Amino acid sequence: MDLKTIATPHVAVRYFEGGSGAPLVFLHGAGGITAQDPFLDALAKKYHVYAPLLPGYGDSEECAELRDMLDVALHYLDTLDALGLKDPILAGHSMGGMIAAEMAALDNHRFSKLALIASAGLWLDAHPIPDLFSLVPYEYPPLLFHDAEKGAALMTQGVNFDDLDWLKGFLVTNARQLGMAGRILFPIPERGLKQRLYRIRSKTLLIWGDSDRLIPPVYAQAFKKEIAGAELVSIPEAGHMLIWEQTARVVAALDRL
């Protein structure tokens, strides 16, 4: 994947681009994304992928003008305008799914195909979503992965959580990223999306891991109820990070759009 820059009204946007085929825009989750992400590589084998970084992620500029969900959704719509993308497949994971759903509701004649992968954005009192902002690194894998041990290895690229150099880098990067993400996720990842989901006209595919402990599958059913005609694909042996644990199955599921 190539890392590129494009100007938008508020900030220069850094984005990954690669592959060939139908255009697909992928919006990352709160953990961010890199050029080496296996999910991006897999997508690029089937699609022409554009994966913009939310300001404050990676080496992108921060942007104080993005104060809330409306600002973020409009920022991403501006980004697609700058890229000249009229009707790409719009896909988002977790926080990125929340933003994608908002975009599809706001500009509801633009996107014919929408994929929400373990999407945030709703809140069920009976199934509260754990507070990511209160966790320390070793607490992430059991929440994010079906197999916590393998998940920890994926997170750290084989380094132990006790490695001080890795830990320092993780904490600095995480603080910067979650500082941006907190504008739309803190104290809970809910900004009134439920009342706007009826506006979505896109053909919508929900993709969820059966073992998601962060945003459990009951949330998939809640999205399905609110979005007309939405289809749900459940992925076995996959947690919240199903895009890493079951990459091939998630990419294959996109064929349903």
Image (cartoon, rainbow, N blue to C red):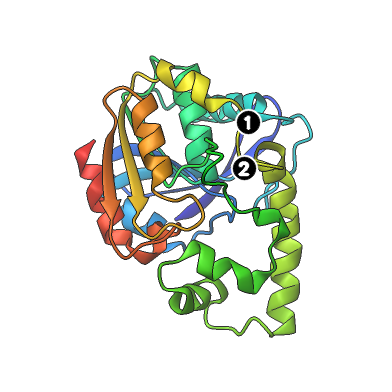
Q: Which residue type does callout 2 highlight?
A: Leu
Identity of the residue furthest to the right in this view:
64
Judged left or right of residue 211, residue 36 is: right
Provide residue 207's location: percent of width, then percent of height: 33, 46
The first of marks 2 and 1 along the sequence is 2
Badge 1: residue crowd in 10 Å (few <14, some 14–19, many ≥20): many
Q: Nearer the viewer, residue 165 or 208?
A: 208
Give the residue at x 62% y 42%. 54
Give the residue at x 74% y 54%. 176
Q: Which residue type does callout 1 highlight?
A: Val
Badge 2: residue crowd in 10 Å (few <14, some 14–19, many ≥20): many
Q: Say if residue 89 shows up in the picture.
A: no
Q: Secondary structure at mark 1?
A: helix
User: Mark 1 sits on what residue?
Assistant: 72
Give the residue at x 55% y 43%. 95
Judged left or right of residue 247, residue 168 is: right
User: Mark 2 sits on what residue?
Assistant: 54
Q: Say if residue 76 shows up in the picture.
A: yes
Judged left or right of residue 179, residue 71 is: left
> Do labels 2 and 1 touch, CB within 8 Å?
yes
Q: Quadrant of the C terminus?
A: top left
Q: Quadrant of the N terminus?
A: bottom left
Residue 219 lies, with reference to residue 7, above or below; the image says below
Provide residue 174's location: percent of width, then percent of height: 70, 60
Give the residue at x 50% y 62%. 144
